[in-house]
Amino acid sequence: KNTPTDALGRPLPGHGGRMALPPDAAAEIKHGLLRCIADEETAVRSSASTAIARCCTAAVALGKSLGAFAVKQWGELLPFLLQCIVAGNDESATPAEDAAAMGALVTLRKLLEDIPNCLSRDAPASSFQDMVPALLRSLRCPSEGRRKEALACLNCFIEPMPGSLVAHMNDYLGGLSALAADPSPSVRRLVCQGIVAMLNSRTEYLQPHMVSIAEFMLRATADADSTVALEACEFWLTFASLDEDVMGNDMMEMVVSLFPRLLPQLLKGMVYPPDKIEELMEANALDENGGADRNQDMAPVFHKSRTKGHHDDDDDSSDNDDDEMDDDDNEWTLRKCSAASLDALSGLYGAQSILPPLLPALQEGLGHTDQWVREASILALGAIADGCKEELGPHMAQLHPFLLSQLTAPESLPQLRCISAWTLGRFASWAVDQMHAEGGDTSLVGRVAEALVGRLLDRHKKVQVAVCSALGVFVESAADLMAPYLDPIYRTLMQALQMYRTRSIMVLFDTLGTMADYIGPAIGEGNLPGIYVPPLLKHWNEIAMENPFDRSLLPLMECLGSSTVVIGMNYQPWALETFEMAMSTIEACTLVFAHEEDALDADDEMADPMICAVDLIDGLVEGLGPNIAALVSGSSRFSQTFPNVLQNLAEH
């Protein structure tokens, strides 16, 4: 694709790749770029620094054609950057030297972000060794921008850890300490970033100073600037992820000593900030009026069947758990990081260390009149569910009815209903255990099912997704205990099918597949299949008529595949229609592939409908057994072509 071609698209003779830049032209370009990073205009310096970083990075990938820009072949690059930085560090530096120093720092930072190992390996050794002391001096610069860029460069050295940084480690840590109270939030954020990077990969350098560092990070977690607080909060999440032999008993005990102040602060960090609350309230109003789906609502949801040998694995058991603990955007926020940190710390330390300092703040938050504070406290309760589930048992008699009330109360905010549903799912195993415990509440599973089903028809899309997901999680724990409630559940789900839009519908299909996997043959008894199979096939037919490649059909076919296996012979009334629709999908995909100029270049997503349709036919074969032959023979459209289709699929 990179080979030069003529006007007709034919490769030019003698060209097997990109043309190399003539040496004279490369030298002129390099000289001009170095001059531009010392320009007094910020925009010129920024553009030149980006061009240098991209040329050096491209030289690594493209080799000969841009070889002149490789760090190894650009011997004057790093010495020039060092010269500019050193000159700018001088107290008598002119404005032009200050500008050149800023341009050099920005360029160095971009290079370190893109090709740190290449820079440390190929740059002139003397210049590279002298760079760290020069950057450390820049940390004392009165210019906020220079301090920020110098610290960002030093932080980039942590992973490759050159000898020059090791030799000046005390100076680097001292520089971080000196900047800990910097008036610039950007600088304070980078201080936290450097400490977190050191904790993650170079813990041994922090251990002698861990008490003072942890105290600083605790204060920074409460910083008024949310970007600083988020970077500091990463410290606790990173700490909880360290190997136990790395953290040691002293570090473990030191962090525990901070829990009375740290855990309430993490709880505060889970409360949505005012600007986000305003945004969510606007989104709530839009949902109330039937707002259109956004791009992120269109992402497909694939049902993960445990039938046909695909049983749960430990590392998949909490798939998408974090997705439901927050609003559904992809931004990593202080709220998400605080919840993840509390989750990780509770898993590391257990209830004996977590509950005593957390419970007072948690109880206060759960009883708060502000719904946003209650919502954050319920999130915290769900976050500690795995680490503290057994010890929370005595409190669940009060907490569980409270969660049900927050889910069902008409005045609850949509976000409060969402997080209550998610947390009920986190404690699903506790509710099921009550069914088997001596003197336990045998009606609890039914009450939870009723509460969740009662919210399936909520008009807010986020509530629909959260409740449908929570129902699936609850089914995984309750399994066949859900059998007595299947009729109203399926009827409500089919009502929801009529009102749900893209994201909600795909989660609904995933939940239906989960019900088939975990409840088993009970979903095929009596008239139950007649409640949900015909509406699903009708929906499939309507969507396929418009677009057989619609992504929402993938989880629909997946859930039908799981259902056909466990319904078995009772699926016969709809088997022929299902078979022909699956075959039509395979046929449509085959036609598309046949018209692709290069099948290897075809988008992988184009094959997904065919894969799901094949899995569905596989489910029919497993569910109907020997009767599948009569089914195929009864298809006037596909009885003759089915063997050929099987052969073509086997070849691919």
Image (spheres, grey):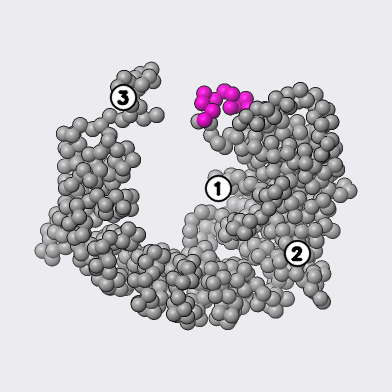
Mark 2 secondary-structure assignment: helix
The circle on residue 12 is none
The residue lying toward the viewer, choosing from 235 and 325, is 235
How many residues crowd mark 3 within 10 Å: few (<14), some (14–19), many (20+)?
Answer: few
Residue 390 spot, x, y in % from top left: 67, 74
**Quadrant location, the C terminus:** top right
In space, the residues marked 3 and 2 are separated at their CA atoms by: 69 Å
Residue 288 visible in the current orientation = no
Q: In the rendered image, which residue does mark 3 sit on?
A: 15
Residue stretch rendered in magenta on the structure:
590-600
1 vs 3, front mark: 3
Task: Report the residue at 56% width, 68% height from top.
Answer: 343
Alpha-carbon distance for marks 1 and 3?
Answer: 43 Å
Q: Is residue 160 visible?
A: yes
Q: Earlier in the sequence, mark 1 or mark 3?
A: 3
The residue labelled by disc 1 is 296
Please state the horizontal and vertical placement of residue 580, each as a whole percent of the image: 75, 31
- The answer to whether 25 is drawn above or below residue 216 in the figure is above
Q: Secondary structure at mark 1?
A: helix
Look at the image and say whether residue 99 sits in the magenta stretch: no
Q: Main secondary structure of the magenta part?
A: helix
Q: Which residue is mark 2?
A: 448
Could you say which quadrant of the image residue 413 lies in? bottom right
Label 3: which secondary element: loop
